[in-house]
Image: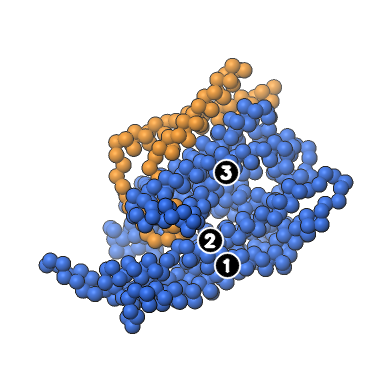
Chain colours: A blue, B orange
Amino acid sequence: MFSAVARIFRTPDLRRKIGFTLGIIALYRLGSFIPAPFVDFGNVQACLAQNQGTSGLYELVNLFSGGALLQLSIFALGIMPYITASIIVQLLRVVIPHFETLHKEGQAGQGKLTQYTRYLTIFLGVLQSTTLITVARSGALFGTNSGGECSQLLTNDAWYAILLMVITMTAGTGLIMWMGELITERGVGNGMSLLIFTSISATFPASLWAIWQSRGVETFLLVLAVGLLIVGLVVFVEQSQRRIPVQYAKRMVGRRTYGGNNTYIPIKVNMAGVVPVIFASSLLYLPALIAQFNQPAAGQEPAAWVTWVTNYLTKGDHPLYMLLYFLLIVGFTYFYVAITFNPEEVADNMKKYGGFIPGIRAGRPTAEYLDYVLTRVTLPGSIYLGLIALIPLIALALVGANQNFPFGGASILIIVGVGLETVKQIDSQLQQRHYEGLLR
Amino acid sequence: MEILQVVLLVVLGITSLLLTFLILLHKGRGGGLSDMFGGGMSSNLGSSGVAERNLNRITVILGLVWFATIVALGLITKFQSGV
């Protein structure tokens, strides 16, 4: 293990790649601390200190940008517009036939889809930065009732200043996108996911420190132990898969024989990854967001439904919220798996190359069999996703940690998923030179 | 100071727009969500041509100018409020 780590740094190719990745990550973090022009840095910092730990509307988005959002830095939007754009493009494949044909076209079509995603990202960047700056200008970024410094976040709110801030933040979003692509191209791992990984783990020390401060050493150690346990569990489930055996018929093409080997289709327990969690939480933010816009002026009684929403749907510690969250995640898991893994397509491809599952005829029976197995395997997967996502809410009720409780929900899934993926890539790079890698 | 600030603002606006434009010109190698969270291993390394390499160089230089402008603007704002 340790000799393998030493070997990473002795391999010049790998060393350069890892150095490049770390350099980009450092640049990304540096950028999240540089305030955008016309932002009153002192006031923002004072306001952040005041509102430490309160769970606002932008909690999840702020988590994904590594705390850059509430600081109104040049990288305030982080990677979020790109994620949203990719999800939208992927979902549009179901709706727009043109996208579906592009998807099936292979390399060139995929490139075109990526290009669409990039344009959409810039568009979303403009939209989101405008929203963010408008909210910051009205002083509602840190909740409606915080006055004083929090309503004076900008030094200049003339139209040209606002316009310039929007343009700057959009350029920042584009730059992040490019940095992620550079990592994918020249570094190790997938750039986008590594950047999210960086942002999320950047908030770890702060939230652990907050637990230590407010709850004492015992709770801190307990949280740490539980966290390690959860990480172990998540790694276990992420790695587990059902292997459906596939036989390939031997074919003679000219003088060569092709195929004739046994492989398997891996069907992972958690095929959907973190995407359902992101979907469900952003969908559950909607009622709270609408309620906030319908907040009446001071002194007036809010409408009945607004009170209901703020009572039941904005705080994470209510059973109704937990139940809804859980059900949404289970539903979205099935939905997303259905989009990403198409049994008929797989069965068709297998038929084309002369492959079959022993005991099952090629073509439609194979597709039906794959669908059957997929549905059954995804059930525990979706329940597992729901439970993992509930951990921070339970911790909120028990320990009083804030919603960004480090060991649970979307953050733990992303951290473990990206970590595993990156280590695997380094490992395969290492095995190109030596047989022994990082993983056993 | 006033003039310098206006000049810097104009530079910032132009570089931001250009930067966004240049980044859109790049060929996307993101791969999207599919291989984002635990997808397959799909790292196909395309060789970047001369045009792409020049584009990279221009983008990096423009990015540096953009960054320096923002820092300079921030410093000016800080000194103005300090005095």
For this view, does A223 lie left or right of residue A104? right
Instruction: Tell me the chain of label 1.
Output: A
Instruction: Tell me the chain of label 3.
Output: A
**Can the viewer see residue B21?**
yes
Is disc 2 in the same subunit as disc 3? Answer: yes
Residue A109 pos. (x, y %)? 36, 51
Quarter of the view holding residue A286: bottom right
Mark 1 is surrounded, within 10 Å at the Cα level, by few (under 14), some (14 to 19) or many (20 or more) other residues, namely some
Q: Which residue is mark 2?
A: A274
Residue A340 pos. (x, y %)? 45, 62
Q: Residue at x 61, y 47 (%)?
A: A67
Is disc 1 in the same subunit as disc 3? Answer: yes
For this view, does B30 lie left or right of residue A161? left
The front one of A63 and A359 is: A359
The quarter of the image holding the N terminus of chain A is: bottom left
**Which of the two discs, 1 and 3, labels the residue nearer the N terminus?**
3
Q: Which residue is mark 1?
A: A331
Q: CA distance from mark 1 to mark 3?
A: 28 Å
The front one of A53 and A254 is: A254
Is disc 2 in the same subunit as disc 1? Answer: yes
Q: Which residue is mark 3?
A: A77
Q: Residue at x 72, y 57 (%)?
A: A314
**Label 1 element class:** helix
